[in-house]
Image (cartoon, rainbow, N blue to C red):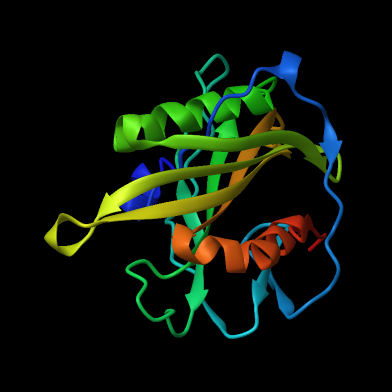
Amino acid sequence: MPCLARVFAHVALALPMLAVACSKDKQEQPAPASELVPRRVPDTNLVVMLPKGWLADMPDPGPLPPPPQDGAKLALLGRKLLEARPGTPAPGMMITPVLHVFEDPWLPLGSTGVDYLVAQRATNQAALGSNIRHVEAEPGRRAGRPSYHVRDEWTVLGAGGQGRDVSQEALLILESVTTPDKRQMLTGYTIVITLEKAEFKSLQPVIREMLAGVRFEGR
């Protein structure tokens, strides 16, 4: 997008802000292995888990822009690094389940998980407005990196004005990086899975397993 300005341009990621005072720092544990296969996200140390049979596309996000000067405000670039979906949609579904991986490079050092959420929320609130329903948000850590696991819903209009409810689960992670001129900054990654709510109940176990399996590996 900017996340789902990035996905309704590409299907909408609304990432809610959660007050730190009412949250707990939870370490997500990998789910038991199932019919998932690892797929490295191009030009990163990030590995995502995809169900067998899902088709992956690695679009060219263009060259990485140079890092901003010190003092620049947090800004999201929303570079789409990977898109994956089933080869065949479920009967009767208007929206095929889809996984996107977005990268937000060069975030200011000292930015927190809440800062990243606020920036995501502002972008997506502009895209979807009050239609967004924030269902769940839980902070955690992924291999020592700050993360948030969030779930949101909204309604889209199909043919004849019939409404379809959409569910979306996402994992946000902040990664420390070194710029070419040896400064420390952060990169934000958003791994987001979007599908119709009618499919959510049956697919939630594998969605949770997919997000729990996200990891970093050395290149």
Residue 109, given in percent of the width and then of the height, sits at: 68, 23
Residue 45, given in percent of the width and then of the height, sits at: 73, 57
- Farthest residue to the left: give it: 160
Residue 180, given in percent of the width and then of the height, sits at: 65, 39
Q: Is residue 57 visible?
A: no
Looking at the figure, which quarter contains the N terminus? Answer: top left
Q: Residue at x 81, y 39 (%)?
A: 141
Q: Nearer the viewer, residue 159 or 20?
A: 159
Q: Nearer the viewer, residue 17 or 55?
A: 17
Residue 57, given in percent of the width and then of the height, sits at: 48, 73
**Snapshot quadrant of residue 213:** bottom right
Left or right position of 52 against 121: right
Is residue 126 positioned above or below 216 on the image? above
Looking at the figure, which quarter contains the C terminus? Answer: bottom right
Q: How many marks?
A: 0
Is residue 50 positioned above or below 47 on the image? below
Q: Residue at x 86, y 46 (%)?
A: 143
Q: Residue at x 43, y 64 (%)?
A: 60
Q: Is residue 28 visible?
A: yes
Is residue 18 positioned above or below 36 on the image? above
Left or right position of 139 against 92: right
